[in-house]
Amino acid sequence: MLVTFYLNNVRVSYDVRPDEYLAETLRSHGVKSVKVGCNETSCGSCTVLLENRPAMSCGILSASIEGKHITTVEGIQEEAARIAYFFGEEGADQCGFCNAGYALTIYALKRELKNPTDDEIKDYIVGNLCRCSGMQSQLNAIKAYLKEE
């Protein structure tokens, strides 16, 4: 079946299977920043922005995104570079597997919440996991990024 949607603001049409998930579709079309970690919507490695909100692409059927806007880290390169800088400064960047998902979630957080508390930040990023470093370094990096104007 043919599905047409906007990928990083570019209209695309892909032939997908009825049982195909968005993570599979994106990766098969060269979007390698979308990782598949748990394949159960629990780790955040497959995070994309669906209509500007973080969503786990391993749990979204590709057929369901007709006409919608999907953003991957390729669509926010400048902001992703800023986030990566702060992750590096705080030692929150280890293997990098989770970085793209984190970047998209943090980008959405910045757009949605103004002056969030630590608890609000933690609640917002709860779906993104890093197995290499503790959450404190990520929290410090996120707070530094959010303070930047």
Image: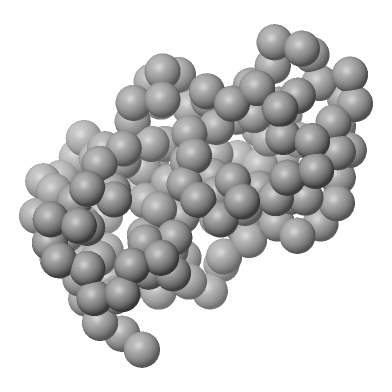
Quadrant of image for the N terminus: top right
Query: Which quadrant of the view contains residue 84?
Result: bottom left
The x, y position of residue 115, in whole percent, is 24, 76
The x, y position of residue 110, in whole percent, is 37, 69
The residue sitting at 48% across, 27% down in the picture is 36
On the rendered structure, is 2 left or right of 108? right
On the rendered structure, is 88 left or right of 104? left
Query: Which quadrant of the view contains residue 5?
Result: top right
From the viewer's side, name the closer residue of 110 and 75: 110
The residue sitting at 73% across, 45% down in the picture is 68
Q: Is residue 67 above or below residue 63?
A: below
Query: Which quadrant of the view contains residue 62?
Result: top right
From the viewer's side, name the closer residue of 85 and 101: 101
Can residue 33 be seen from the camera position used here?
no
The x, y position of residue 17, in whole percent, is 79, 13
Can residue 28 be seen from the camera position used here?
yes
From the viewer's side, name the closer residue of 2 and 34: 2
The residue sitting at 29% across, 50% down in the picture is 124
Q: Is residue 64 above or below residue 149?
A: above
Q: Residue furthest top?
A: 19
The residue sitting at 55% across, 49% down in the picture is 49
Number of numbered labels in the structure image: 0
The x, y position of residue 137, in whole percent, is 13, 58
On the rendered structure, is 39 left or right of 129? right
